[in-house]
Image: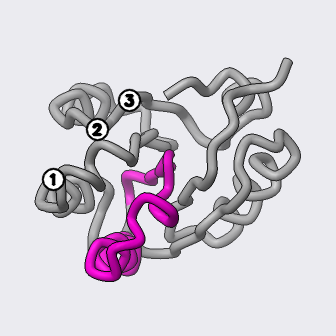
Amino acid sequence: MAGKKYRSVMLIDDNEIDNLINQKMIEAASIADNIYTHTGAKSAIEFLRNMERLDVADKVLPDVIFLDIDMPLMDGFQFLDEFEKLSDTTRKKCRIVMLTSSINPQDFNRSKKYENVKLYLNKPLTHENIVSLNV
């Protein structure tokens, strides 16, 4: 069963191996034409801000952002706080899937406070998670 097709998705995880595995899983499921990969939340936020400034948001912004929670410098929740400050266009276009290896229920409850967080998944992504994705 094929999942929903997206123009682009973004992976944000400080663990390059997790990013690579998730990228390969997304490619194998053929759910996205483009996959952007960031190993830090700061660079991902900068990328999104730059796309807004260049006025190419409709064509370039990812439909889905897979966001790791536990990262150095800027964690997933700090990313979400910065994401909230972006334009309406960006916030409407990008849906966020929280990815975590944490079993802390507080993380799950905290993620529900953000309107753009549509799904909360445990790492690693599975083929079933990806093909059933409908955010």
Sort mark 2 into few (<14), some (14-19) or many (20+) by Cα contacts within 10 Å: many
Distance between the alpha carbons at the discs numbered 2 and 3 = 6 Å
Q: Is residue 83 magenta?
A: no
Tags 1 and 2 touching, CB below 8 Å: yes
Could you tell me the amino acid type at mark 3? Answer: Lys
* Nearest the eye: 76 or 91: 91
Q: Which residue is mark 3?
A: 118
Tags 2 and 3 touching, CB below 8 Å: yes
Residue 25, how many percent across, how many down? 79, 47
Residue 45, how many percent across, how many down? 31, 71
Highlighted magenta segment, given as a residue range: 41-70
Q: Which residue is mark 2?
A: 116
Coloring applied to the structure: one colour
Tell me what residue is drawn at x 18 percent, y 59 percent.
Answer: 87
Label 3 secondary element: strand
Distance between the alpha carbons at the discs numbered 1 and 2 = 9 Å
* Nearest the eye: 49 or 104: 49
Q: Quadrant of residue 11?
A: bottom right
